[in-house]
Image (cartoon, rainbow, N blue to C red):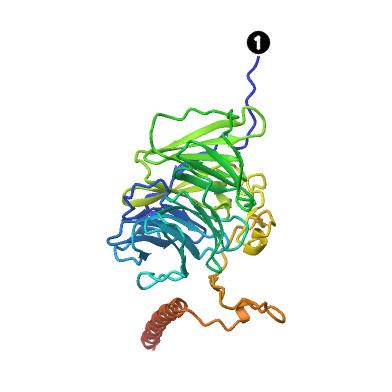
Amino acid sequence: MSRRVVRQSKFRHVFGQAAKADQAYEDIRVSKVTWDSSFCAVNPKFLAIIVEAGGGGAFIVLPLAKTGRVDKNYPLVTGHTAPVLDIDWCPHNDNVIASASDDTTIMVWQIPDYTPVRNITEPIITLEGHSKRVGILSWHPTARNVLLSAGGDNVIIIWNVGTGEVLLSLDDMHPDVIHSVCWNTNGSLLATTCKDKTLRIIDPRKGQVVANNFEEPVALQEMDTSNGVLLPFYDADSSIVYLCGKGDSSIRYFEITEEPPFVHYLNTFSSKEPQRGMGFMPKRGLDVSKCEIARFYKLHERKCEPIVMTVPRKSDLFQDDLYPDTPGPEPALEADEWLSGQDADPVLISLRDGYVPPKHRELRVTKPNILDVRPPSGPRRSQSASNTPLSQHTLETLLEEIKALREQVQAQEQRITSLENMLCELVDGTD
């Protein structure tokens, strides 16, 4: 009599759990635009959600800790003249986010650590190069300030956000609408899907398709009959892929291994309400003390609900096997190094002592002077040492931060006065 052997895996018992009601973000008018992006982006500092906006496009940015009911007058990030279709946080600066819009532009924004007093309307830079709507954004995983965009013109453009220049334009790769684009781990290759039902692996610097039309899949998994778009999220640290269907009410997750059958179904997290979009927290933003290996931000019609994926463990010590060193916020390359052909893996950090996001770091854009073609003489000055004048956006940001700090100081002074009065009353009462 043969005995069935159970596959060994530390992720077999991963379970999902929705956060408590007071940990959700309520009263958010999530965008109703019919587009296939996730409508949500999250990092260890902020949650960003594309929202309904009259007369243009907007998204809201909330500090992660600002849970509960969101004030209807909470400041938005507005600047696009048509609906925002995609947003993506910079992996190397938690205060920088890019937005793509139906108005054919990409805007890059600096988000302050304090809550702004009014709407943020001035982007750091506006990138113009597409002739139709821009629906896909993806930052390079290891090179500083390198951003990819894909538009309804079937063109992929790779930008240097630090200078506002187009690094590469891939305009003859796709005969039809591009559905999705992602980088590989070191950013040397792209994978794209297209309306022509072809998956392409592209070397962007050579401008070549290096693989497509895979004849036989290594694994085939029957999902369901829903016609909703699948939003896949892959965690390279645990080799788990999570599949969230737009309009679906479940998250299915699978472990990927190097041995056949390659794809192993783990479980399904199900809830009552369908998801309109989904955000996925980078590994450095998770709570390692609770064996949290993934956290999603599920969009409903009027709220955003965190969903935590946990590996059950009895010990409350740091679990080395669950948390290998993971990509941190430091880039491994500069934009010009990557463009010249260099590749580098992400700079990894340990999560043993938890992760504390760095303080506000400003992204400065230095547009090259196309009229001045003289080679630089003498030692190259660092950007911080240059005499570049502060932009109007920077001045407004500084003024708002000063105002916010003054209000905090004023509140502290009032509190001190109140405590002093209480102390005097106590002393008088004792006498």
**Observer able to see residue 334:** no
**Nearer to the camera, 244 or 157:** 157
Residue 194 lies, in percent from the top left, at 48, 41
Drawn side of residue 50 relative to residue 338, left or right:
left
Residue 387 lies, in percent from the top left, at 58, 84
Is residue 161 positioned above or below 180 on the image? below
Question: Callout 1: few (<14), some (14-19), or many (20+) C-alpha neighbours within 10 Å?
Answer: few
Q: Secondary structure at mark 1?
A: loop
Outermost left residue: 54
Is residue 398 positioned above or below 246 on the image? below
Is residue 347 positioned above or below 173 on the image? below
**Nearer to the camera, 277 or 339:** 339
Which residue is identified by label 1? Answer: 1
**Observer able to see residue 398:** yes
What residue sits 47% from the left and 45% below the top? 178
Residue 15 lies, in percent from the top left, at 50, 39
**Dividing the picture into quarters, in which one does residue 201 lie?**
top right
